[in-house]
Image: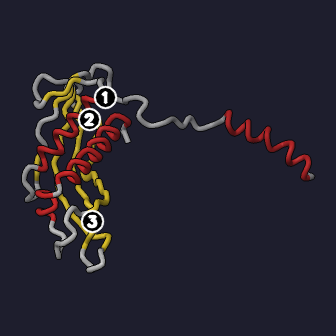
Amino acid sequence: MTRRELLRALPVAAAGMAAASCGYALAGRGSFLPAYIRTLGIPMFQNATPYQSVEQLFTNKVRLEFQSSRRYTVVPSDEGVDGIVRGSIQNISLAPVGLNDQQLASRVRFTVIVKVSLEDVKAQKTLWENPSLSFSDEYDLASRTGAAVNVAAFVDNDRVAMDRISTDFARSVVSAILEAF
């Protein structure tokens, strides 16, 4: 095949490939949940870590994220609902990933591991679950003077980062549940 023939055939091949595309679609366009699920119960997540009140923050963010979709009524109970989202915070860890001029941690990688599931009350079955959903992100430390990275101090003192972490986590969980990934 000559170069000229190849150049003529290229647009035809490209059009054929486009027509036979795999059906890829953007995320966030729908929900795989049954249509009868309109009310979601999201009871307080369990907390298997020594860090107090993180379960409240993460649970509330997941509730708010489901509410913001405007497709579901969210209640803090598992009674009188169509579906139940349950969660258990299994582990929280910090690891330094950036150092300042004094070789002290200035940036950390925060990782939270959560067991999450969505139960269909009517069908009495689990529609989605992840027994060890790992969510990680990096954050600048508010105080760059500490000699060691301390999870408890980070959880207790860096409210802006904890708010961002819990919001990002909630978006990930709700997206995973609604899109069945």
Element marked by disc 1: loop
178 lies left or right of 144: right
Separation (CA) of disc 1 from disc 3 = 31 Å
Element marked by disc 2: helix
In the rendered view, tell whether residue 156 sits above or below residue 36: below
Q: Label 1 is placed on what type of residue?
A: Ser
- Mark toward the viewer: 1 or 3: 3
Mark sitting earlier along the chain (1/3): 1
The picture places residue 53, in percent across and down from the top left corner, at: 8, 49
Mark sitting earlier along the chain (2/3): 2
Residue under label 2: 65
In the rendered view, tell whether residue 92 sits above or below residue 70: below
10 lies left or right of 153: right
Q: Label 3 is placed on what type of residue?
A: Val
Q: Residue furthest bottom?
A: 102
Q: Is disc 2 surrounded by few (<14), some (14 to 19) or many (20+) residues within 10 Å? A: many
User: Which image quarter is the C terminus in?
Assistant: top left
Q: Label 2 is placed on what type of residue?
A: Glu
- State the residue in front, 38 or 147: 147
- State the residue in front, 50 or 167: 167
- State the residue in front, 68 or 100: 100
The picture places residue 89, in percent across and down from the top left corner, at: 16, 51
Residue 30 lies in what quarter of the image? top left
Residue under label 3: 108
Separation (CA) of disc 2 from disc 1 = 7 Å
Element marked by disc 3: strand
Q: Is disc 3 surrounded by few (<14), some (14 to 19) or many (20+) residues within 10 Å? A: many
